[in-house]
Amino acid sequence: MGDKMSDKTNEPVKELKGLTEQEVELRVEQGLDNRADTTTDKSIKEIIFSNAFTYFNLIFLIISILLLCVKSYRNLTFLPIVIGNTLIGIVQELRAKKILDKMNLLNAPHATVLREGVQKQILSEELVKDDIVVLRAGDQICADATVLEGNVQVNESLLTGEADEVEKKAGMPLLSGSFVVAGECYARLDKVGKDSYISRLATQAKSMGSGEQSEMVRSINQIVKWVGIIIIPISIILFYQSFYINHTTLQKGVTSTVAAIIGMIPEGLYLLTTIALALSTMRLAKNKVLLHDMKSIETLARVDVLCVDKTGTITEPSMCVKEIHAFSGEYVHTAGQYSRFDEAEQSTRFHETELEALLADYVRASKDNNATMQALKAYMAQNIGKNDNAVNYKNTDTENRQVVEVFPFSSAVKYSGVVFNDGAYVLGAPEFVMQSHFSEVEQELLPYTMKGYRVLIFARYAGRDLKNGLTEEVTPLGFIVLSNPIRANAKETFAYFKAQGVQIKVISGDNPETVSEIAKQAGIEGAQNYIDATRLDSQFKIEEAVREYTVFGRVTPKQKQQLVQALQKDKHTVAMTGDGVNDILAMKDADCSVAMASGSEAASQAAQVVLLDSDFAHMPSVVWEGRRVVNNVERSASLFLVKNIFSLLMSVFSAVFMITYPLEPAHISLISMFTIGIPGFLLALEPNKERIKGKFIKKVLLKALPAGLTDVFVVGALVICGDVFSLPSADIATAATL
């Protein structure tokens, strides 16, 4: 590939040219761009329609017409409330949408495209059919494409559910929605916009309805559904009884029936929930927190286990090379084991200057652009050739070293490799590179891992095939010590979660001792309990480990997913945070997923919550906001349902005892506004940090039922007394409102 695979944009590419600007404009005019509605969020039209054209608004319209027909104008006092509720709901949802659209634009997926021989980065929606894009590790494939040149490892789990990485070579198809795990390639876009695979999936998801709603919203919808079912037969019974059996006037029959209907309709409850969620979304937006999914507010509030990655969450995303060391003696592989030269033979060992020169060639050949490789490139640029004692690799045999093949880093095997004309070399996690011989080099690495440093091993490989595992002899040459500073606010953040009763599980691909030390420094409870995930070779062991250990090291992407599933099996509500493609499988299965915007674009697009400034310290505020919303809506819902339960039971009481419903619509409107509506909305805005427990609908009904029954007994007693003492029904109705 040569010069084609450059990390730099605006760099000419020798052979592939891509489309011209005229060709791009022509395709845009033909509608062959990558714009498509792949979001499940409501459009402006859908927001207006969903708030204005509801089942209960239809009922309000019908009963308004009936009241007008019988000339009961004073009982139309509920109309301003209904209209106001509808307008407030529309305005608040539109405000929230406006803010989120702006934030989504900031977090919109980008793509590196080749046009007129120049690479440049553009928004993925600006791509057109036949564009040539450059795909690298961490990129999400934004349209269906065909590989032209290069070789990539692709994960299609978000589409197929299969976790295995699939190798894609020239001529092979790439599906939009999948993401690149390793490698680099050029690909031509074949299907864009609404024709792409991910767009068709999004359309299907959008048509699936409310399956992904939160428990709170789902419970409120259930209440609304139940009321909607029973309200019609009850209203028919009440009108028939009042007009035909009790022989009241038509006006009285209509008004009493309408009063019962209005009393049973929880018109403000759904509005309250919508406004509370919209306001929370806007408050979080001010803190640079983007919600892809509204239900994540409630889910995070219910979380009792938070799974975090080390890099980018506990620590800063950037790394730096602290030291590079050759091993204290050269390791020789003989008779199936490694041995070291004795002191008399130390002169023949691999020198650090030679190691640095070889590493410089390795770094130059590598196509990886992850944090580790960036740290190595910075170190080489700063140190190689500038030390008086260092080898100037341009004056050694290394200048003649030629690259034969490059094997990019893969989180599945945890190493990368380069095959030169003089042999193959690998760089990666010591346990995975050395495999069964790790114990023979462990002691030399232990002083660094125990201090929380990340250690990588650099080794010579006797074979040439790096794609199918390290099956040949591996000779360790040296190791690299990397530091990754802990976030300044990490201790405070984890102290908050400890106080809130939220368990922390640290799941990382790094050495477990290193991760444990970092977790201790961050103040994570139980950080001393760690395990090497290479020992977890069965689902049973994983399920046992999640109960016993806090820190998991050397975890593969598939194991991260299995750990999340094991926690969920134990009845935990699990949130997963991450920033790389190796976290996506776990994020996909977690109850709520949180991504750092500074990490992989694929991770940001897969997550429900994105921290746009990549500051993990925002997590307590997200949890706090969720708890405030759910707890306050729960309290307000109980208050709203008192009226609904009262009206329902009062209707049943009226039907059983053959009396006319005692209240009129005007009375119900006054009760709703001053004793329920205003207090309910005020309650919804109060601070509340209590952890959410139990089922929403059960708790709400149990709180509302005693008050509803009390009201029925009091009003029922008033009605009976009115009949006994022949009091006017208007006086009874007025007294009942008190």
Image: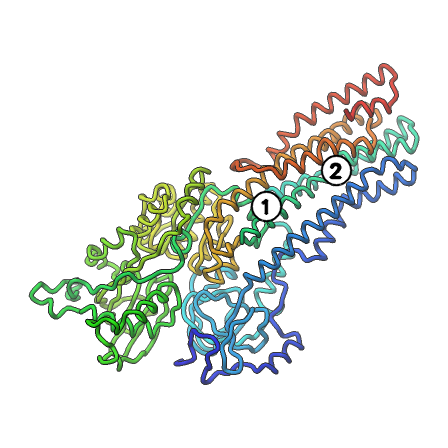
Kindly identify the residue that appears in the image at 55 percent across and 48 percent down. Answer: 296
Position of 62 relative to 730 (above/below) = below
Q: Is residue 468 visible?
A: no
Q: Which mark is residue 265?
A: 2
Please state which amino acid type lies under the numbered disc 1: Ser
Q: Residue 62: x percent and y percent?
A: 84, 43
Q: CA distance from mark 1 to mark 2?
A: 22 Å
Compared across the picture, whether 442 is left or right of 601 comes to left
Q: Residue 483: x percent and y percent?
A: 32, 57
Give SS at disc 1.
Answer: loop
Residue at image mark 1: 214
Position of 582 relative to 638 (above/below) = below
Q: Quadrant of residue 72?
A: top right
Give SS at disc 2.
Answer: loop
264 and 603: which is toward the camera = 603
Please state which amino acid type lies under the numbered disc 2: Ile
Q: Quadrant of the C terminus?
A: top right
Q: Quadrant of residue 221?
A: top right
Kindly identify the residue that appears in the image at 22 percent across and 59 percent down. Answer: 437
Q: Residue 379: x percent and y percent?
A: 31, 67
